[in-house]
Image (tube, helix red, strand yellow):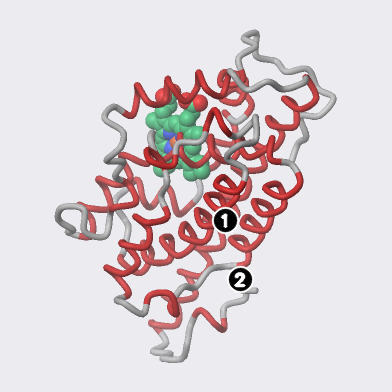
Amino acid sequence: MESLKNKPVDSPNSDLSEQIKAATKDSHIRAENTQLMLNYQKGRITQTQYKLLLCSLYEIYQALEEELDRNCDHPAVQPIYFPQELARLESLEQDLEHFFGPQWRKKISVPAATHRYTQRLREIGKNSPNLLVAHTYTRYLGDLSGGQVLGKITQKSLGLSGNKGVAFFLFPGVTSPNKFKQLYRGRMNSIDLTEQERRDVLDEATRAFEFNIEVFDDLQKMLSITEENSRNDVTSNTFASSPVLQ
Ligand code: HEM
């Protein structure tokens, strides 16, 4: 992955929100064009696929939100700390319970890339909380943007009604996603960072996208194995034997 360190920040605007958008533009295109996201956009989403995605999102948001809660008074976290409006963990728990039943915790299955992503979140929560904003931007602003379309596609493709199974995509505490994103950008811009710290945040944001891309690619591999096994009528625990699992 290309590093932004020692490179001039090329956006003419000095706002962090503008710079982070410019710095991750190419990564966003790559994320949108992963096989998983391309299939998603075409409405080719199966329940198996969605359940696997929910498992990874659960692990990711658990790490992200625990680190945000722990660092909520940190000067680089406090302005962008919106648990009421943004927290996804409880909604993911509801969705997982909907699909897997009350024993859902025992059925969580995630690929190696998801572990790497959560390890990074824990590490920066502990050692560099300044960088958490790169991850909150990547996930929450994404959920409030393209994520809203993905929610509708999920509902339609899987024939779900109300918020059953799709609570993850719904933000009852956010009346207007666009207005909220504006508010959030203003809060990001209010964080006091040195030039080096700002570069580190921009660098971390491209890493955050990279982590997501790797998760999608691993999930796609797991799904290919699942499909292959079901074609071969293999009834063993497919995911446990997957090479993408740690
Ligand atoms: C913004 C679409 C995947 C992160 C957006 C916007 C759209 C969009 C339409 C609004 C752009 C704007 O307001 O200028 C999509 C589609 C996706 C997808 C169709 C896949 C099917 C992703 C993924 C991530 C992501 C996988 C990260 C994990 C973001 C972020 C923004 C955004 C952070 C906010 C950009 C900003 O305003 O600074 N996306 N997206 N998106 N997306 Fe995505």
Q: In this view, does 169 lie to the left or right of 194?
A: left
Q: Residues within 10 Å of mark 2 (few under 14, many from 20)?
A: some
The quarter of the rendered structure image containing the C terminus is bottom right
Q: Where is residue 197 in the image (x, y as percent from the top left)?
A: 76, 27
Q: Tell me where residue 94 sits by quadrant.
A: bottom left
Whether 48 is drawn above or below 90: the answer is: below
Kind of residue at badge 1: Ala
Task: Farthest residue to the front: give it.
Answer: 73
Whether 76 is drawn above or below 163: the answer is: above
The residue lying toward the viewer, choosing from 111 and 45, is 111
Q: Which residue position is annotated with label 2?
A: 244
Whether 106 is drawn above or below 217: the answer is: below
Q: Where is residue 106 in the image (x, y as percent from the top left)?
A: 45, 80
Secondary structure of the residue carrying tag 1 is helix
Kind of residue at badge 2: Val
Q: Position of residue 44 (x, y in %)?
A: 32, 56
The quarter of the rendered structure image containing the N terminus is top right
The residue lying toward the viewer, choosing from 105 and 242, is 105
Q: Is residue 30 left or right of residue 88?
A: right
Q: In which quarter of the image is ligand 1?
A: top left
The residue lying toward the viewer, choosing from 70 and 235, is 70
The tag on residue 186 is none
| Residue located 27% across and 68% down the image | 98
Task: Farthest residue to the right: give it.
Answer: 6
Q: Tell me where residue 16 sits by quadrant.
A: top right
The tag on residue 63 is 1
Q: What is the C-alpha distance between the residues marked 2 and 1? A: 20 Å
Q: Viewer-nearest of labels 2 and 1?
A: 1
Q: Can residue 32 be seen in this view?
A: no
Q: Position of residue 86 (x, y in %)?
A: 41, 41
Q: Can residue 231 be seen in this view?
A: yes
Sequence-first disc among 2 and 1: 1
